[in-house]
Image: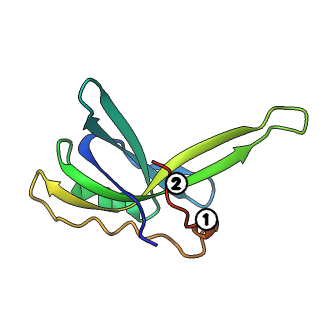
Amino acid sequence: MKDPTVRGVVHLIEETKTFGQKGFRKRLVVLEQSKGTFTNFVPLEFVKDGCDAVDDLAVGDEIEVTYRLSGRRWQKDEASEAKYFLSAEGLSFKRLSGSGRSNDGSGGAIDPNDALAEAGDDDVPF
C-alpha cells in the first residue's frame, strides 16, 4: 500500500536534536498550507538519517512529503490517566518548487528493525 503524502510550503526547519544515550536524532519541519480563510501548519518529524536529508531544504520551498503516522501511549503509573501522542514522521520528500537544490530528499530511509515499522497499513482517515 502506498504511503500517504502531504504538500505545502516549508515554513520552519529546526536544528537536529539528539536524545538519549544511543543518540536518537530528530528534526522538525513545519509545512504551511493556505486553506482559504485560514492557514494550516503541519509539523513533520524527520528521524535518524532523514535529519540530514532536510539540509537540502530551505524555507519557502514547496514540497511533497511522504509520511507515516506514529502513535504512542504514556502513563506515569497505574493510578494516573493515560495520555496518547500522535506524530507524523517524514519518510522522504520531493521538491515541487523553490531553491533549485537537489529535488529528492529520499535520504530519510527508515530502519526496518524500528518497532514502529510494524504499524498497520490502514489508510489515513483524512
Q: CA distance from mark 2 to mark 1?
A: 9 Å
Give the residue drawn at x 60%, y 65%.
120
Count residues near mark 1 (Cα–Cα under 10 Å), then give few for <14, some for 14-19, many for 20+.
few
Viewer-nearest residue: 13 or 11: 11
Indicate left or right for 80 with 101 as reference.
right
Q: Residue at x 36, y 42 (%)?
A: 14
Residue 80: horizontal and vertical position, in percent?
Answer: 84, 32
The extreme left residue here reads 100
Residue 69's disc number: 2
Look at the image and tell me whether residue 123 can be seen.
yes
Pinpoint residue 42: horizontal percent, then vertical percent: 38, 40
Q: In this view of the protein, can residue 12 be seen by the observer?
A: no
The kind of secondary structure element at disc 2 is strand
Instruction: Mark 2 and mark 1 in contact? Answer it, CB < 8 Å.
Output: yes
Neighbour tally class for label 2: few under 14, some 14-19, many 20 plus, Cα within 10 Å: some
Q: Residue furthest bottom?
A: 112
In the picture of the structure, the residue carrying the numbered disc 1 is 119
Above or below for 14 versus 110: above
Q: What amino acid does circle 1 point to?
A: Ala
Judge left or right: residue 80 versus residue 22: right
Q: Looking at the picture, how far across and down is residue 96, in whole percent? A: 16, 56
Q: Amino acid at mark 2?
A: Leu
Seen from the viewer's position, the closer of residues 58 and 74 is: 74
Q: Is residue 25 above or below residue 104?
A: above
Label 1 residue SS: loop
Compared to residue 82, the image places residue 62 above or below, namely below
Residue 97: percent from the left, percent from the top? 12, 53
Whichever of callouts 2 and 1 sits on the residue coming sooner in the sequence is 2
